[in-house]
């Protein structure tokens, strides 16, 4: 296009002088460019404009909150008041109880949910998932004298006998046999102590920092404890494994000792599977120290819930754990609805200092994980953290801000905000090009 430009001869000396100045001092060229651009009136008071745009963005969380309240047709204070009345009706026998959204490990209800307690045979949830993840179900397990000596609930396996690991896992989960728990632990971990190390490492990996396993069976032992919250997180992880679900939902299983052919049939002792629609587990437990315990789970098209009750009565009140579990599950079904809390938002442009493009566009990538169960008593708000301005150069997909989601003023998740485009920094070549355009009246 330059050969079409008509530059008057009398302007040539001035133009050549300007080019020479640019060669020796590109910073001076940039300053001149900015001065000319500002003189055109195309950009007026950029800082004031940027401040106005960002203030508008900060108002979005209040607007979003009002929209949520309008959708429910009730003010937040009234929601909370109604919910508090509902919560007062939840009467449980358990020393510790908790309800968790298994999709994201969010606690929906709890009483003493972080209290460290013995948890009896609910320990076997971890024993089973460790075996599934660290060994072949077709492995042959040879029974030790120590495994055969385990007390209380037993399959009555004998020293030297051999079983397929998959068969012992049915014995473990359907009838909670302690001898098979030790046989599995010795096979997978080399010893009970070695297996306990694997269990505790897995617990830490899952974020369960208030848990310490000593035995694979859950028999009372000094230093063996967990919390309802940790146990719910372990169960939420376990039910994502379809092999685990297949075992724990089997009504009965028949198998034989490999060498002698001695036959066994184990039947599922989990009554909860027949108490509620969608029930998928998980594990019972009882010791004198722990009382009656139960970890339950339900799976429905719009939700997965896990409940935990520890110390839910002692003999003869073995049915308290079922009533407690149903109370928790019904609370979750009645008071929570699946909602999309992610707000796909268009942000105002942000001023870019020293950029060849004056403004950068910001964006949030679609995040379907922020579809979640929200209680009638809960409020959601979003806080946007956005930059006042950016410095060139800028790469696209650079994180420069965030949207923080709060549920009942408790931080839940932080979603990054990205830049949309590459923007180069103003340099000599850019300045020279723009000055030619301005000089020729083509800006």
Image (cartoon, rainbow, N blue to C red):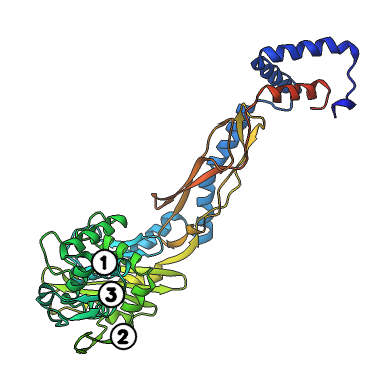
Disc on the earlier residue, 3 or 2: 3
- Residue 280 location, quadrant: bottom left
> Which residue matches tag 2?
251
Instruction: Tell me, yes or no, if residue 317 can be seen here.
Output: yes
> Which residue matches tag 1?
126
What x and y, as percent, mark residue 32?
Answer: 70, 16
Compared to residue 426, the image places residue 22 above or below, namely above
- Direction from residue 90 to residue 437 in the image, left or right: right
What x and y, as percent, mark residue 362?
Answer: 59, 42
Residue pictured at 16% horizontal, 74% vertical: 286
Instruction: Tell me, yes or no, if residue 313 can be seen here.
Output: no
Q: For marks 2 and 1, give the CA distance.
A: 21 Å
Q: Secondary structure at mark 3?
A: loop
- Residue 59 location, quadrant: top right
- Direction from residue 400 to residue 213 in the image, left or right: left
How many neighbours does mark 3 have within 10 angstroms: few (below 14), some (14-19), or many (20 or more)?
A: some
What x and y, as percent, mark residue 207?
Answer: 30, 55
Q: Secondary structure at mark 1?
A: helix
> Which residue matches tag 3?
139
């Amino acid at each position: 296009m330059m050969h079409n430009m008509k530059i008057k001869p009398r302007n040539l000396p001035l133009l050549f002088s300007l080019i020479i100045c640019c060669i020796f001092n590109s910073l001076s060229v940039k300053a001149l460019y900015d001065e000319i651009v500002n003189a055109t009136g195309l950009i007026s008071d950029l800082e004031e404009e940027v401040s106005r745009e960002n203030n508008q963005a900060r108002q979005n969380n209040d607007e979003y909150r009002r929209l949520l309240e309008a959708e429910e047709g009730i003010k937040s204070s009234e929601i909370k008041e109604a919910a508090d009345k509902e919560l007062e009706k939840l009467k449980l026998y358990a020393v510790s109880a908790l309800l968790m959204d298994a999709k994201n490990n969010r606690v929906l209800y709890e009483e003493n949910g972080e209290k460290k307690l013995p948890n009896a045979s609910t320990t076997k949830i971890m024993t089973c998932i460790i075996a599934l993840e660290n060994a072949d179900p077709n492995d042959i397990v040879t029974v030790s004298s120590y495994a055969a000596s385990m007390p209380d609930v037993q399959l009555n396996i004998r020293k030297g006998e051999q079983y397929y690991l998959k068969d012992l896992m049915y014995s473990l989960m359907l009838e909670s046999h302690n001898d098979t728990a030790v046989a599995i632990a010795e096979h997978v971990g080399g010893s009970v102590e070695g297996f306990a190390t694997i269990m505790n490492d897995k617990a830490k990996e899952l974020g369960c920092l208030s848990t310490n396993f000593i035995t694979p069976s859950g028999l009372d032992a000094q230093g063996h404890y967990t919390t309802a919250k940790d146990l719910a997180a372990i169960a939420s992880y376990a039910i994502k494994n379809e092999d685990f679900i297949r075992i724990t939902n089997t009504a009965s299983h028949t198998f034989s000792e490999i060498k002698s052919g001695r036959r066994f049939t184990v039947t599922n002792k989990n009554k909860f599977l027949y108490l509620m629609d969608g029930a998928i587990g998980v594990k019972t437990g009882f010791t004198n120290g722990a009382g009656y315990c139960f970890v339950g789970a339900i799976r429905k098209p719009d939700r997965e819930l896990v409940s935990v009750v520890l110390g839910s009565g002692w003999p003869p009140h073995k049915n308290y754990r079922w009533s407690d579990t149903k109370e928790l599950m019904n609370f979750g079904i009645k008071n929570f609805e699946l909602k999309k809390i992610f707000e796909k938002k268009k942000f105002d442009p942000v001023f870019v200092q020293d950029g060849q493009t004056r403004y950068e566009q910001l964006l949030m990538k679609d995040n379907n994980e922020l579809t979640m169960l929200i209680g009638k008593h809960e409020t959601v708000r979003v806080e946007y953290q956005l930059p006042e301005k950016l410095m060139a150069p800028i790469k696209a997909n650079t994180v420069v801000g965030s949207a923080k989601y709060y549920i009942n003023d408790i931080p839940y998740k932080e979603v990054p905000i990205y830049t949309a485009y590459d923007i180069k920094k103003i340099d000599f070549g850019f300045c020279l090009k723009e000055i030619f355009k301005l000089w020729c009246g083509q800006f």
